[in-house]
Amino acid sequence: MLAHEVSGPAGAPVVVLGGSLGTTGAMWAPQVAALRDECQVVVFDHRGHGGSASPPGPYAIEDLGKDVLALLDHLGVDRVRYAGLSLGGMVGMWLAAHAPERVDRLALLCTAAHLPPASGWRQRAATVRTAGMGAVVDAVVARWFTPGFPPEVVAEFAAAFLTIDPEGYAGCCEAIAGMDLRPVLGSVAAPTLVVAGADDPATPPRLAETIVEGVRGAELVVLPDAAHLASVERSGAVTALLHRHFTAA
């Protein structure tokens, strides 16, 4: 079972938040604080992240999606409003395409339906398995925030990155390496919001445009002054967008 935290009133609409590769549910703290008055908010950690166990890799996006379905079954939740950033967004696309009855509304932040080259992800997986998370921390965290973002926050997220289990991280890298969700985007029926960071080097806006072209009726918002972890760097804007999307009549 994935590690998770639930907050907000029982019986309220359920919002599920799935985070980025290399982070824990702490990346959603501003959104949880804002949404939990009107919604029941579930924040989970991917395999090997936070308190979630690390089965041996490699994984596939399908495996990570089925982890979330198992969590929803455990919680007794039939249908949710789902927001995912980066890897969490990839899982969200898989869920909305393969278990559409479980996803009422979908928000995809700083993510991609396909993120080649696969060789780069497999090399990163091999590196962390042999040399640990410290071997890639600087390169990874450099993509998360724009230059000039408060260094104490950057340091906090870098420290959290070092606590991620290398096997779980590597397995998730391999899931991204093998992922191509473009063929199933047309089957996503949930109302979908796509958010990109204008300065995101990991998943630039052109990748968000590909999602919008594939998902019928999807809305695209590009946030200025935002790199990859937009939920942190542009927390107020992201919170407002999610609140509007998830509480719309």
Image (spheres, rainbow, N blue to C red):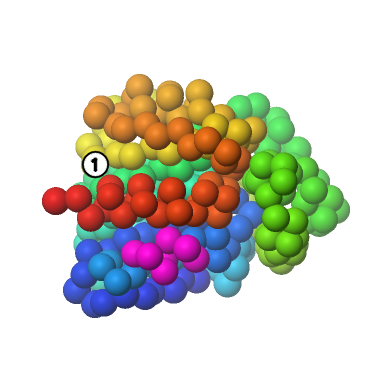
The answer to whether residue 231 is above or below residue 218 is below
Front residue of 4/234: it is 234
Front residue of 169/66: it is 169
Predominant SS of the magenta segment: helix
Farthest residue in the left direction?
249
Residue at 50% from the left image edge and 23% from the top image edge: 206
The answer to whether residue 212 is above or below residue 75 is above
* Residue 41 included in the magenta stretch of the image: no
* Residue 32 included in the magenta stretch of the image: yes
Rate crowding at label 1 as few (under 14), some (14 to 19) or many (20 or more) other CA atoms within 10 Å: many
Residue at 57% from the left image edge and 41% from the top image edge: 226
User: Which x, y percent locates residue 43?
Assistant: 44, 65
User: Which x, y percent locates residue 139?
Assistant: 77, 43
Q: Which residues are magenta?
A: 29-35
Q: Is residue 111 visible?
A: no
The answer to whether residue 179 is above or below residue 22 is above
Residue at the spot of label 1? 190
Rendering quarter of residue 152: bottom right
Under circle 1, the secondary element is loop
User: Which x, y percent locates residue 73?
Assistant: 30, 67
Number of labels in the image equals 1
Front residue of 47/210: it is 210
Residue at 67% from the left image edge and 42% from the top image edge: 146
Q: Is residue 224 visible?
A: yes
User: What is the three-letter code of the residue carrying label 1?
Assistant: Ala
Residue at 34% from the left image edge and 64% from the top image edge: 35
User: Which x, y percent locates residue 24?
Assistant: 57, 63
